Amino acid sequence: MVTGLLLAAMTQNGMAQAGEARLETALSFEKEGRFEEALINYERLFDSGASQDVVLQAKLGAGRIYLDVMGEVTKASALFNEVSAQVTYPDLAAGALACNGKALLAAAKDADDLDQAASEFEAVMRTYPDSPAMAEALMSSARLFEMQRKYDRAVSNYQTLVVEHPSAESVSEAFRRLGRSLLQIGALPQALTAYQRAQEGPAESAAAAHARQEATLVCRLFLSRKLPFQTHLLASKTDALKLDSPSRMVVQEDGNIQIEDKNRFFRLSPSGELLPSQTAGRYDFRSPSGMGYRLTRNGFAAGDGARPLIPYFFKDEKRKHFKEITALAASRYQTIVISTRGPDGLYFVDRESGEASLWHAAGGGSPRMRLDSEDNFYVLTRDGSAVLILNRWSSRLYRVDVNPLDMKKISDFALDSLDNLYLLDEKGQFIILGALSRADERRLKPLHRQSVLDARSKPLSDLKVLTVRADGTVYVASKKQVIAFR
């Protein structure tokens, strides 16, 4: 009997050690961005007989991947709820509560859902004030306050985080977000100070890089109120650069500019050098989480090599396909909205089944859709007369019309990293609309108007596409030229 007990104890000890080793492997894979391998190892621990704290850590890790990487909110939330119920493991329970708040935020369909997400963050701060999850709860609740346009409360949370949790990994990002929130309440000097503090973190960090770019953008926009942008002819039509009718222009991750023109692709360096064309990784829309989407005539593919999904709808109890999908936008957690012809409208697409349901009656046949940092959808009307701004629940927030702005027709539009709106007018100008202080309501006001002139100082009348670099450099392409404004 004693021998049996010893063998059982040795077996249990061995299982515990194996569980801890697998957990370390999974955590390492997650940190390295090898999420599929991390998830496999996490899930193998669920029924492995490992100690309860190891199993709970595995469920928490798997939930993070389901939420942040795969956008599987329901699966993530179920795992977080399991872990948060284990109050005898307070640090894990607190971490799960904070993560579940993020999951509820991702799935929110109305203001009540936002309040429910806020209650999770508040539970962490109230019940587990000494937990390592406090920094995450403060950060996430501040982001929620930004979405609710409660910028004073967002500022308070960010300030608490950076003062009381100075060693948290999120401090640099908190300083950057603090700068953005301070801008919204009109505190420019304090905002620039916050951006400077964000840059004091690791130089290679994304937060430091974004803070440098946003600070540069803020200064550029304020200077543009008194001084025009400097104009630089980047490239002209040649035998190699055969511009005809550019339809899309983007700044790639490597900093180069890619122009799409009748299914041909041209790449320019920031100095205007023509580079070898590149079609790999070419997307019609890239979501905030990094997922790329490529349109076909009546469908779309998510990621490289994926089979196109052909959305469908029901009419007279019969399954129908759209005549054409003209534009697409997808949120951080893969809420997919398409603009269609035949029938016309904006439709929400279930990314598992492909079934589409009417999301908003306006906006059908849009040539361009974009998303801002608060997951609001921007939709260019088919005739170029306006940009519609809709929140994540399809309610209209604002309509930007051409007539009050003395514009003829919007050829293209873009958003910068601070959600300022850049409108390209086909009659030879672009206008920047925004509200560096918009705590009252979303009232987009002109910040800058820039003429786009030809060599004879006359407005160019064939402007086609526009894009904006993170530091505020604007690129405009016509049928014959690519011009940079700095």
Image: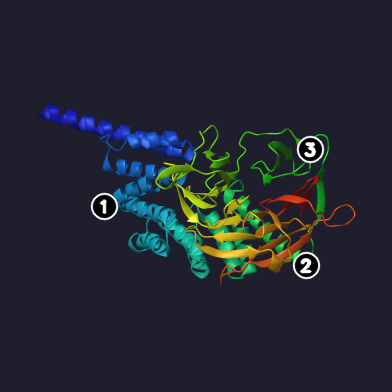
For disc 1, the marked residue is 88
Q: Which residue is mark 2?
A: 226
Question: Within the image, what quadrant is residue 447 found in?
Answer: bottom right
In the image, 353: left or right of 192?
A: left
Expressed as whole percent of the image width and height from the top left, the position of residue 288 reads 54, 49
Of the numbered discs 2 and 3, the one sitting upstream in the chain is 2
User: Image quadrant for the C terminus?
Assistant: bottom right
Q: Secondary structure at mark 2?
A: loop
3 vs 1, front mark: 3
Residue 262 falls left or right of residue 77: right
Type of amino acid under label 1:
Thr
Q: Nearer the viewer, residue 289 or 201?
A: 289
User: Tag 2: Cα neighbours inside 10 Å, few (<14), some, or many (≥20)?
Assistant: few
Q: Tell me the kind of residue under disc 2.
A: Lys
The image shows residue 232 at horizontal and vertical percentages of 82, 50
Answer with mark 3 or mark 1, whichever residue precedes in sequence: 1
Find residue 226 and report its image quarter: bottom right
Which residue in the structure is indicated by mark 3? 242
